[in-house]
């Protein structure tokens, strides 16, 4: 057994335990921290198969931006865990059933896809996996990339639409009205008499 194989099994155990702690931890902050550990471990496993670009993207995008943002949001919201446990026993059998079905489906897909795969193909010297990934994305899988971008665009528009609220305490900017404004409409000169303070008796002496 090689060092890479031993390291893979160690990382796999850490990945499974941290992912399990994400959904079982009682504190939201603890769950987010375990999710960061899960992403770090998955990035290390990608490094083992020499997918350096994907590993770095996972760390920079998800761990460095998304998960840190989630952590700050959860800490600022000060979520109460008392109400989250209500009704857990009622929905626990259904949740376990769905979880077992999903695990079986993923195991079936992995076994049928990678069950008969042998050792990985040798990588020649000077091979650029980042360039190979870009070429594959924008040639063979260009349609899938466009569909994914469209789905993300729809999700972004939906998130903006859901968070918009009709408020009456702010004014909307209308560029057409701003262009038509004249100086006389914005500035008014007022002529006022100057006010002079009279000196007190002590100051006069």
Image (cartoon, rainbow, N blue to C red):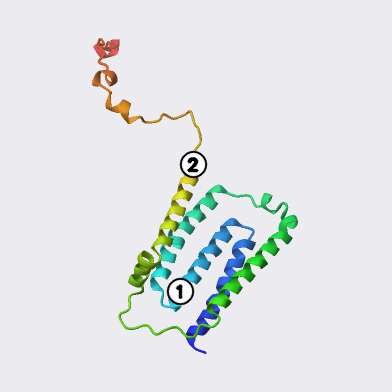
Location of residue 188 by image quarter: top left
- 119 vs 172: above or below: below
Q: Earlier in the sequence, mark 2 or mark 1?
A: 1
- Nearest the viewer among 78 and 11 is 11
**Residue under numbered circle 1:** 46
Location of residue 91 by image quarter: bottom right
Q: Position of residue 13 (x, y in %)?
A: 58, 76
Residue visible at 72% across and 51% down?
Answer: 86
**Residue under numbered circle 2:** 161
The crowd level at tag 2 (other Cα within 10 Å; few <14, some 14-19, many 20+) is: few
Q: Position of residue 130 (x, y in %)?
A: 35, 71
**In the rendered view, does 197 fall on the left or right side of 34?**
left
Tell us which disc is closer to us: 2 or 1.
Answer: 2
The crowd level at tag 1 (other Cα within 10 Å; few <14, some 14-19, many 20+) is: some
Q: Are marks 2 and 1 in contact (CB under 8 Å)?
A: no
Q: Position of residue 59 (x, y in %)?
A: 43, 65
Residue visible at 51% across and 81% down?
Answer: 7
């Amino acid at each position: 057994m090689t060092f890479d194989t031993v390291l893979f099994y160690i990382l796999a155990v850490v990945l499974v335990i941290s992912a399990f702690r994400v959904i079982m931890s009682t504190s939201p902050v603890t769950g987010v921290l375990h999710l960061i550990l899960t992403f770090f471990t998955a990035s290390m496993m990608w490094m083992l198969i020499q997918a350096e670009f994907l590993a770095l993207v996972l760390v920079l995008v998800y761990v460095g931006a998304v998960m840190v943002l989630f952590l700050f949001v959860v800490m600022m919201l000060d979520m109460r865990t008392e109400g989250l446990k209500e009704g857990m026993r009622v929905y626990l059998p259904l949740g376990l059933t769905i979880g077992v079905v999903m695990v079986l489906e993923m195991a079936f897909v992995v076994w049928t896809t990678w069950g008969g795969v042998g050792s990985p193909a040798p990588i020649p010297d000077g091979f650029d996996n980042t360039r190979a990934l870009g070429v594959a994305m924008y040639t063979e899988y260009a349609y899938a990339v466009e569909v994914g971008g469209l789905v993300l665009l729809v999700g972004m528009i939906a998130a903006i639409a859901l968070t918009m609220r009709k408020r009456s305490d702010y004014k909307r900017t209308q560029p057409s009205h701003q262009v038509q404004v004249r100086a006389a409409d914005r500035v008014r000169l007022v002529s006022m008499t100057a006010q002079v303070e009279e000196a007190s008796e002590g100051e006069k002496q």
